[in-house]
Image (cartoon, helix red, strand yellow):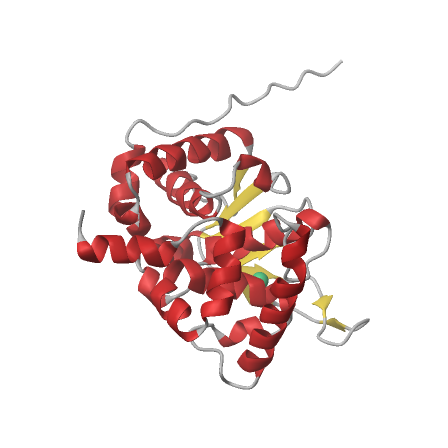
Amino acid sequence: MRFFRRRPPATLPDNWIEIVEAGVAHWTLLDGGEREWLGELMEALVAEKRWESAHGFALTDEVRTIIAAQASLLILGLDFDWYQAVQAIVVHPSEIVQREPQPGPIEGTMEEGPFSLLGLADHRYGPVLIAWDVAKANARHPAWGRDVVFHEFAHKLDMLDDVVDGTPPLHHPEDGPRWHSVCTRELELLRDGEGWPLRDYGAQDPGEFFAVATEAFFNLPLQLEEAKPELYEVLRAFYLQDPAARLRRRATGP
Ligand SMILES: [Zn+2]
């Protein structure tokens, strides 16, 4: 008979607020209630998901806390159940190199590696892979308009209905037609070079479009709201958050 010893679940470190204050720019925009809820989501994410590191990289309190904060921010208007497709979070120190062949751009074809990635959310219950150096820089600099944690965890929300098609489960079925028409039109505009402030990477397919639009929604909300108000609105209705209002609140003060 063999005995397996379970590792005790991890917890947030006592100084998690200090870590987040120093490393997560969005923290300064949250009000007291939002900060408290963020802390509860972070606690659940750290304790209930499997955290692993690649290549002997040290999974420090800072690493877990910053990634948990960014991932929790995405579901601040939702709740923890939305991460039921997240089982493991695997942190790499830096760019992730994959050597296995990958499906190519044409269906049924494979491309030879190596491929370098900053993150990956593979299939429904597959792990989320994150490159720590990139995640850390993104959390400090939202104005860059990109975030590997928002991106990969957005794919996990998209996967909840089993398909990565750019449409996560919507709160009301009647929202479907508007979601599809807005996202389809904006994907076409992005492919035609009129996607700003969305990154070109989102032009690949509807799944990447949703992940890239999520990055802009959180990190460039004022620009997205102004340039693409309908896209901003469907994302606001899904995430049940209004990051542009948060920024304006800070600009005008209490
Ligand atoms: Zn992606």
Q: How many circles with numbers are drawn on the protein?
A: 0
Is the residue 15 above or below the residue 196 in the image? above
Quarter of the picture containing the N terminus is top right
Q: Position of residue 220 (x, y in %)?
A: 37, 65
Is the residue 244 above or below the residue 24 in the image? below
Is the residue 170 above or below the residue 216 in the image? above
- Residue at (67%, 63%) from the top-left corner? 177
Q: Nearer the viewer, residue 20 or 229?
A: 229
- Residue at (40%, 67%) from the top-left corner? 225
Inspect this view and state whether residue 118 appears.
no
Q: Quadrant of ligand 1?
A: bottom right
Is the residue 203 above or below the residue 91 in the image? below
Q: Nearer the viewer, residue 95 or 183?
A: 183
Hey, which residue is sitting farthest right in the picture?
108
The quadrant where residue 185 appears: bottom right
Inspect this view and state whether residue 231 appears.
yes
Q: Position of residue 246 (x, y in %)?
A: 31, 53
- Residue at (53%, 73%) from the top-left corner? 201
Hey, which residue is sitting farthest front in the picture?
174
Q: Position of residue 79 (x, y in %)?
A: 52, 37
Q: Position of residue 148 (x, y in %)?
A: 47, 58
- Residue at (70%, 71%) from the top-left corner? 112
Hey, which residue is sitting farthest left in the picture?
253
